[in-house]
Image (cartoon, helix red, strand yellow):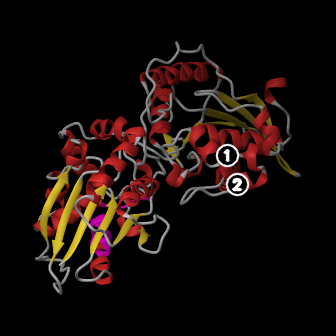
């Protein structure tokens, strides 16, 4: 069995302002750095992590550096990889707008619905939701192929990729995967994938053990 | 840095554009309107044309510089966090530096000068064309027409929102020459100080360029 511990990055100022980041190189803010340290300590008491695969954007690199230390991983070492497959959706020209701006554009929908309406388009220079899902599921299949069957792997990524990973495992469509999940900063989601089973596009046998856990904040 | 983000005008930006439109209608007899196709210049154009009976055409070449993956960062974050893009820090290399999937200043200038040359080439004699664009293209066009390098141009300052520059173009047998008659200041009374700042750095109106195109003998009709 492969255990995959998936963590969303810590808070940034753009998160607290409700601005959509896409691939913008936005750093963690002070709260985000504290969240990553606390989540790392919490994980270290529960998981024996063999390696990590992280989105290569700034906010996930900064989060990974803080998660790795208590887990005994070296952020620049050869057990930690940075992959574009785990990046957030590329928002193209929408990068930097607020959710409220999107709501202005699609006032006939509620906030979440407006996000979906916006999401069904491919923003100029960016990715559609389907593009994102395909990229993340390729990353998921690559990850399962390259780690050992008994490995425990940390994945440090973003809200969008986690929504689609959960949607894939639960067999949800794009719209439900996008609307029915919510990830806190440094929320921890754990998936278990049986040895030898395929990371199939349908009927992935992985199970969800934790979803968006934030108990690290309670201590 | 908004780049190509479809940010709307603020209420103050709309008011600025309405005032600029009134001032332009009083000062110029506009024959044709060309505008950047981004949202903020489309909205500015609609407000400007409240007093002018001209159908605008939209042209990508008058867009703001694309900052690619740096779009949405503040000016300080871009130029202090990434000094390789700064003319002050990096000089010529700063003008050539291309943000990931964005445009360098040189790329942007090439595109804007393309737009300018096409506009001049297709202009009728004595036509007055209103161009609605952004700070970057107007800065670059002023420098280009004045024959200034970036360092000299930076010292002239950055065009203000709904500032207006006027270019007078002569076509003679020897080619095309352009003069800058107004450098980008406002034609209208300023609108009260901003109270509606936006975290994404919403623009308040956008620089407008009026250029006048003359033909033939190179005589300035206004001096006759």
Q: What x and y, as percent, mark residue A86? A: 35, 65
**Mark 2 — on which chain does it sit?**
B
Mark 1 = which residue?
A: B123
Query: Which quadrant is home to the C terminus of chain B?
Result: top right
Whether residue A193 appears in magenta in the rendering, the answer is no
Residue furthest bottom in the image: A196
Residue furthest right in the image: B174
Query: Which quadrant is home to the N terminus of chain B?
Result: top right
Q: In the shown orientation, is residue B136 left or right of residue B195?
A: right
Q: Earlier in the sequence, mark 2 or mark 1?
A: 2
Relative to the observer, which residue lies in front, A95 or A209? A209
Which label was assigned to residue B106?
A: 2
Q: What x and y, as percent, mark residue B142? A: 74, 39
Q: What x and y, as percent, mark residue A218? A: 21, 41
Q: Which residues are magenta?
A: A125-139
Whether residue B129 can be seen here: yes
Check disc 1: other Cα within 10 Å, few if <14, some if 14-19, many if 20+: some
**Mark 1 — on which chain does it sit?**
B
Q: In the shown orientation, is residue A80 left or right of residue A112?
A: right
Residue at x-position 75% and y-position 55%: B93
């Amino acid at each position: 069995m492969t255990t995959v511990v998936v963590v969303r990055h810590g808070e940034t100022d753009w998160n607290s302002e409700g601005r959509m980041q896409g691939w913008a190189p936005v750093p963690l803010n002070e709260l985000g750095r504290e969240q990553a340290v606390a989540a790392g300590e919490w994980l270290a008491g529960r998981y024996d992590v063999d390696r990590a695969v992280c989105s290569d954007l700034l906010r996930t690199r900064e989060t990974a550096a803080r998660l790795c230390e208590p887990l005994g991983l070296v952020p620049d070492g050869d057990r930690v990889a940075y992959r574009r497959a785990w990046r957030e959706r590329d928002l193209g020209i929408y990068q930097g707008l607020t959710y409220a701006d999107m709501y202005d554009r699609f006032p006939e929908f509620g906030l979440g619905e407006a996000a979906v309406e916006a999401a069904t388009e491919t923003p100029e220079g960016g990715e559609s939701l389907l593009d994102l899902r395909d990229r993340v599921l390729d990353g998921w299949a690559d990850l399962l192929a390259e780690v050992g069957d008994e490995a425990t792997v940390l994945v440090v990524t973003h809200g969008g990729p986690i929504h689609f990973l959960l949607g894939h495992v639960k067999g949800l469509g794009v719209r439900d995967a996008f609307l029915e999940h919510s990830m806190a900063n440094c929320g921890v989601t754990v998936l278990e994938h049986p040895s030898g089973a395929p990371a199939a596009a349908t009927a992935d046998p992985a199970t969800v053990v934790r979803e968006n856990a934030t108990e690290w904040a309670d201590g | 840095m908004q780049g190509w983000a479809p940010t709307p005008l603020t209420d103050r930006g709309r008011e600025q554009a309405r005032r600029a439109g009134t001032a332009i209608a009083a000062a110029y007899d506009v024959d044709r309107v060309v505008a950047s196709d981004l949202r903020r210049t489309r909205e500015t154009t609609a407000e400007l044309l409240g007093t002018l009976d001209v159908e605008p055409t939209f042209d990508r070449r008058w867009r703001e510089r694309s900052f690619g993956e740096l779009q949405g960062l503040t000016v300080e974050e871009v130029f202090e966090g990434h000094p390789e893009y700064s003319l002050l820090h990096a000089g010529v290399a700063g003008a050539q530096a291309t943000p990931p999937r964005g445009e360098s200043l040189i790329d942007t200038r090439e595109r804007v000068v393309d737009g300018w040359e096409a506009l001049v080439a297709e202009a009728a004699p004595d036509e007055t064309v209103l161009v609605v664009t952004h700070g970057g293209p107007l800065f670059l066009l002023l420098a280009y027409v004045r024959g200034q390098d970036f360092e000299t141009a930076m010292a002239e300052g950055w065009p203000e929102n709904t500032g207006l520059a006027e270019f007078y173009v002569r076509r003679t047998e020897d080619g095309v020459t352009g003069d800058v008659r107004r450098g980008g200041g406002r034609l209208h009374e300023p609108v009260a100080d901003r109270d509606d700042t936006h975290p994404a750095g919403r623009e308040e109106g956008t620089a407008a360029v009026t250029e006048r195109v003359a033909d033939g003998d190179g005589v300035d009709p206004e001096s006759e």
